[in-house]
Image (tube, grey):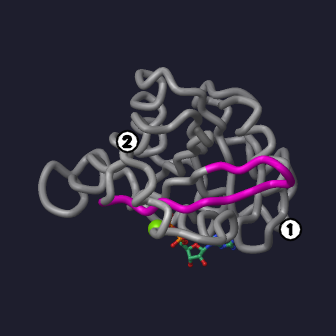
Amino acid sequence: MKPVIALVGRPNVGKSTLFNRLTRSRDALVADLPGLTRDRHYGEGRIGERPFLVIDTGGFEPVAKDGILHEMAKQTKQAVAEADVVIFLVDGRQGMTPHDKTITDFLRRSGRPVLLVVNKAEGMKYTSVTADFYELGLGDPYVISAAHGDGVMDLVDEALDSA
Ligand code: GDP
Ligand code: MG
């Protein structure tokens, strides 16, 4: 089985941008994976000789109890349950939000390995873009720009080593 990486984070942190950068093909392969549910967005990626699957999620919005946002949180939970490793994206331009803390609590309970990743970090200093996020207790954050590609390959290598 290929390792499964789930992309998790609140809406607008850049999950789909990262997903699109990581994947070449999608959807077609889902039919070959009887263990995986179809209602999420799966793609296949490869770094060198290392293939992997990646799951995009709508975005974890833990406060809402009804409607579409609740549905997205449910899908995120299912994606995490299927994952070997979680890439938890936060927004380095917006900084920390209460939702980031709620997601952290949920991810900790999941028992999955989690890489904390500060996105939108192009042109920003590591120390300033990461400072907010140490209080999440997830260790040294990774820093990427999903839009520009900075740091993405190293991140995936690290994720696959943790899977
Ligand atoms: P999602 O809701 O988490 O899937 O986020 P999206 O991938 O849809 O991105 C939300 C917004 O952030 C879009 O306007 C993206 O263009 C922007 N974005 C994503 N990645 C980056 C990045 O690395 N740098 C900057 N500056 N913007 C980004
Ligand atoms: Mg998205």
Place of residue 42 in the rendered image (x, y in percent of width and height, measured from the top left): 48, 60
Q: Is 49 one of the magenta-colored residues?
A: yes
Place of residue 114 in the rendered image (x, y in percent of width and height, measured from the top left): 60, 32
| Element class at badge 1 | loop
Q: Is mark 1 within 8 Å of ligand 1?
A: no
In magenta, the rendered stretch is 39-52
Name the quadrant of the C terminus: top right
Q: Is residue 159 left or right of residue 122?
A: left
The amino acid type found where label 1 is placed reads: Gly
- Give residue 139's quadrant in the image: top right
Residue 23 vs residue 64, the one in the foreground: 23
- Give residue 157's quadrant in the image: top right
Q: Is residue 122 left or right of residue 111?
A: right
Name the quadrant of the N terminus: top right
Residue 85 vs residue 101, the one in the foreground: 85
Residue 81 vs residue 61, the one in the foreground: 81
* Residue receiving disc 1: 123
Residue at the front extreme, as displayed = 32
- Of the numbered discs in the image, which one, if any, rests on residue 103? none
Residue at 65%, 62% in the rendered image: 93
163 over 53 or under it: above or below: above
* Residue receiving disc 2: 35
Residue at 59%, 27% in the rendered image: 113
- Give residue 3's quadrant in the image: top right
Residue at 56%, 39% in the rendered image: 86
| Label 1: how many Cα within 10 Å (few below 14, some 14–19, many 20+) | few
Q: Is mark 2 within 8 Å of ligand 2?
A: no
Q: Is 152 one of the magenta-colored residues?
A: no
The amino acid type found where label 2 is placed reads: Gly
